[in-house]
Image: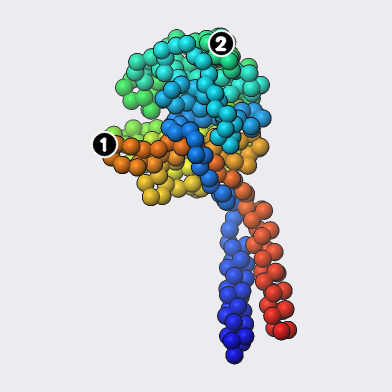
Amino acid sequence: MRTKYLRKHWTACLLAVCLASFLLLLFLPKNQPFIIIDMPLLNPDPVYQLDWSPDGNKFVYSTEGGIFFMNTDGSNITQVPLNSSIWFERPRFSPDGKRILLQGVWRYISDCNIYVVNLNGTGLQQLTSANGSRDPDWSPDGERIVFSRHVGNEIDIGLGGIWVMDANGSNQRRLTETGFQPAWSPDGESIAFMVQQVIPGHSGKYSIHVLNLDNGQERQLTWPTELLYSTSGIDWTPDGQWLIAGLSEHIYIVNVADGSFQWIIPSLFGRCNMYPRVSPDGTTIGYIQYVIISHYTATLKIHLAKLVIIPQFKFIATAFPILALLILRRKHRI
């Protein structure tokens, strides 16, 4: 009697899983992204922004104490010895892994400029002299730097637009009238950036744009979305097909070809996810999660999320019903 009861319920459960798998296979679009593992690093805390080394083995990150390196498992933390009173943030490894781009703030956020330094802290050089120069990113060959320049009181509006310069700070020229937080594509042919349209009430509509450097054409990938907060940056996947964007408290993935997007790391239970960076092999997203502990304390930790695209998942969705049917067949033989 017990065997028949279990067999009956096992059969119902397996049939339900089969049906769910087939529906998943039928209705989910191709190249659908999924986060399958999301784990925090225990140390350090707090962390404000991070970047991957070109070999994917280290992080460079900014915190209250300065700029630091560490292994991607959180071990071997070392500080970059910068003999300066400037507050440095938004570090970016050069493509050859020998230098770091930095955004330096003197007194106010509008006083920021762009710097470059060797890994051992020597050779600190200021590349820009116009206040409001920020958000630097390397070209894939390391020969040029894209950045944004801000004017006015609203630092996130990006009224100064997107600029580009040689790696030594020369030949600075303007590419767009507006925009901020630029990111150079892996093939070097495009630059993605954020645009904000200011509306009354101190909120704004944000959209992601891509500029083709060959023909100068600019296209909008996402519709303007009203956000209560702000944006924390954009990064490309190594194949150039996707953009990972920090929008408000969530992290989104954007299809560069058709502009479709969805969140993949949502804000849950008061957790704010921001400053995403994709690993060089494209399998992991490193980002900062801000969690309020009490009225006076909060944590800012690095999280690592494994990224999987749907073709692999569709294989599982296809194979699982077959496995379930084989189990059903075996059970009915008992």
Q: Which residue is mark 1?
A: 201
Q: Residues within 10 Å of mark 2 (few under 14, many from 20)?
A: some
* The N terminus lies in quadrant: bottom right
Q: Position of residue 190 (x, y in %)?
A: 59, 29
Q: Does residue 180 appear to the left or right of 258 in the view shown?
A: left
Which residue is rendered at x = 70% and y = 69% of the image?
A: 323
Mark 1 is surrounded, within 10 Å at the Cα level, by few (under 14), some (14 to 19) or many (20 or more) other residues, namely: few
Q: Where's residue 240, x and y in %?
A: 63, 36
The image position of residue 246, as x and y in percent, is 46, 38
Q: Along the horizontal axis of the image, is 184 left or right of 152? A: right
Can residue 133 be seen in the rendering of this structure?
no
Q: Residue 122 has which mark?
A: 2
In the image, 65 versus 251, the foreground residue is 65
Which three-letter amino acid code belongs to the residue tagged 1? Answer: Gly
Q: Amino acid at mark 2?
A: Thr
Asked whether 245 or 55 is in front, the reply is: 55
Residue at the image point whose x is 72% and y is 78% from the top? 330
